[in-house]
Image: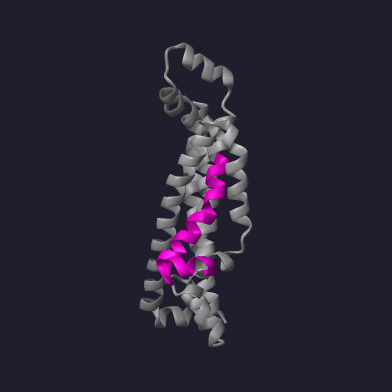
């Protein structure tokens, strides 16, 4: 099986390189959107805490929807292809981003916030110069979990006509080509592990920076 898989990779390198590029594009666009939206929502509910239960309840509910069902629900609105995959992945990735942003900011010591305000800092200054820097390790941990999950989940995008390494898995299953299925799965897992390692390094840096 290993020899067959390696042989397939060498023989059809261009095909898998193209799928790898598509997978990275879909994943990175989704991750970027989720970071921007998740940070914004997390900051808002941390500043207006009365809305936190409602917002977190909605995000948690969306997260419980099976991925295939969400993709199917979006098809009538955005059609098949990469756009629908990006929307679905971005929606799923909101939970860890919103939750970690909210928790990170909410756990900043009130004494530190009070001291910063007492020194003349405005709410915006306290948020961006005190709360967010102190919450960054928790936020980075959320980005790490979200990125790994998004890269792995992007594999199902092929079922609604999107690109990515899921195409190899889908073709392998439909044609009973075990080598192609294994290779597609392995490459997705490899991407997820690499993303975890890279963001893990960033996470360690934020902890050191916080300690300093």
Task: Please name whichever residue, 210 or 145, is drawn nearer the observer in this view of the structure.
Answer: 145
Up-down relation of residue 197 to residue 48 (above or below): below
Bounds of the magenta span? 72-100
Identify the image's colour scheme: rainbow, by chain, secondary structure or one colour. one colour
Task: Please name whichever residue, 119 or 202, is drawn nearer the observer in this view of the structure.
Answer: 119
Task: Indicate left or right for 52 with 22 as reference.
Answer: right
What's the residue at 48%, 77% (across, down)?
A: 168
Task: Indicate left or right for 157 with 18 as reference.
Answer: right
Q: Is residue 100 in view?
A: yes
Question: Seen from this angle, which residue lies furthest bottom?
Answer: 175
What's the residue at 45%, 53% (across, down)?
A: 31
Does 96 lie within the magenta span?
yes
Task: Indicate left or right for 121 with 110 as reference.
Answer: left
What's the residue at 48%, 11% (across, down)?
A: 118
Does 74 lie within the magenta span?
yes
In the picture, which quadrant includes the N terminus?
Answer: bottom right
What's the residue at 42%, 45% (across, down)?
A: 36
Tell me where residue 30 appears, x and y as whole percent: 44, 56
Tell me where residue 67 appears, x and y as whole percent: 57, 64
Q: Is residue 103 in view?
A: no
Tell me where residue 185 appears, x and y as whole percent: 54, 71
Task: Identify the main secondary structure in magenta.
Answer: helix
Up-down relation of residue 188 to residue 49 (above or below): below
Tell me where residue 136 appears, x and y as whole percent: 50, 35
């Amino acid at each position: 099986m290993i020899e067959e898989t390696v042989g397939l990779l060498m023989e059809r390198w261009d095909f898998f390189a193209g799928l790898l590029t598509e997978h990275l594009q879909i994943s990175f666009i989704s991750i970027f959107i989720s970071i921007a939206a998740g940070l914004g929502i997390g900051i808002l509910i941390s500043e207006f805490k009365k809305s936190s239960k409602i917002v977190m309840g909605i995000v948690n509910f969306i997260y419980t929807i099976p991925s295939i069902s969400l993709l199917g629900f979006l098809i009538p609105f955005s059609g098949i292809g990469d756009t629908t995959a990006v929307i679905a992945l971005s929606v799923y990735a909101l939970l860890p981003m919103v939750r970690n942003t909210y928790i990170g900011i909410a756990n900043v010591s009130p004494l530190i916030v009070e001291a910063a305000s007492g020194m003349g800092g405005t709410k915006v200054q306290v948020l961006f110069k005190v709360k967010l820097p102190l919450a960054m390790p928790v936020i980075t941990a959320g980005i790490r979990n979200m990125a790994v999950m998004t890269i792995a989940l992007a594999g199902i995008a092929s079922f609604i006509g999107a690109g990515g390494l899921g195409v190899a898995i889908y073709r392998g299953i439909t044609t009973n080509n075990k080598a192609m299925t294994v290779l597609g799965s392995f490459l997705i897992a490899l991407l997820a592990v690499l993303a975890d390692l890279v963001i893990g390094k960033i996470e360690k840096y934020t902890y050191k920076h916080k300690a300093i």
